[in-house]
Image: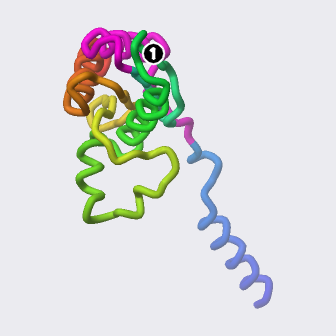
Amino acid sequence: MPFRLATAAMLAALLLVPSSGSAQVLMQRDVSLRMALTIAEAALAECGVNTSVAVVDRAGRLRVFLQGDGASPHNLELARRKAYTARTFRQTSAAWAKLTETTNAGQRMLADVIPLGGGVPIKVGEDTIGGVGLSGAPMGQAQEEACAKAGIAKVADQLR
């Protein structure tokens, strides 16, 4: 009887443990260097020389940063954080800022996020593969968001 009980227990344990045969390699799309550079150049051309542009990849890492000739030094940090916020929360940084005014306010304390407009997620369907953020546009955050969208539009054919 103890042998049967031990055998049954071992068989049950083996059935509950996932087998290595079910392990898989994840295949994920990401922002390439060429794509990031194309987005950044188009966004900078749209917003002008006082603007800085940052593009982050799927993991939120900075891929490209372009600083316009007339951009302020702090624009680098603001642009990067806007891009990171858009990537992390899968929505524009302006939409996230509005959402966290009244709910989920604790999210504003996370490192590297910023409740300012000017960041736009880069998506393939519903999959967010990166983000682009701008800072320093002459007409403010709404213009920065529009320029980010113009940059993404340059690579729209690759985001299908």
The picture quadrant where one finds residue 16 is bottom right
* Residue at horizontal 23 percent and vertical 46 percent from the top: 95
Q: Residues within 10 Å of mark 1 (few under 14, many from 20)?
A: some
Q: Position of residue 146 (x, y in %)?
A: 20, 25
Amino acid at dot 1: Leu
Q: Position of residue 63 (x, y in %)?
A: 51, 22
- In the current view of this chain or complex, which residue is farthest to the bottom? 1
- Is 102 in the magenta? no
83 displayed left or right of 20: left
Q: Is residue 67 above or below residue 9?
A: above
132 displayed left or right of 138: right
Label 1 sits on residue: 66
Q: Is residue 129 above or below residue 40?
A: below
82 displayed left or right of 146: right
Q: Position of residue 155 (x, y in %)?
A: 30, 14
Q: Is residue 7 above or below residue 106?
A: below
Q: Is residue 41 above or below residue 109?
A: above
Q: Can see residue 159?
A: yes
Label 1 sits on a secondary structure element that is: strand
* Residue at horizontal 66 percent and vertical 65 percent from the top: 14
Q: Position of residue 154 (x, y in %)?
A: 27, 12
Q: Nearer the viewer, residue 16 or 71?
A: 71
* Residue at horizontal 29 percent and vertical 49 percent from the top: 96
Q: Nearer the viewer, residue 2 or 115?
A: 115
For the N terminus, the quadrant is bottom right
Q: Can see residue 134?
A: no
* Residue at horizontal 27 percent and vertical 59 percent from the top: 101
Q: Nearer the viewer, residue 86 or 32?
A: 86
Magenta range: 24-51
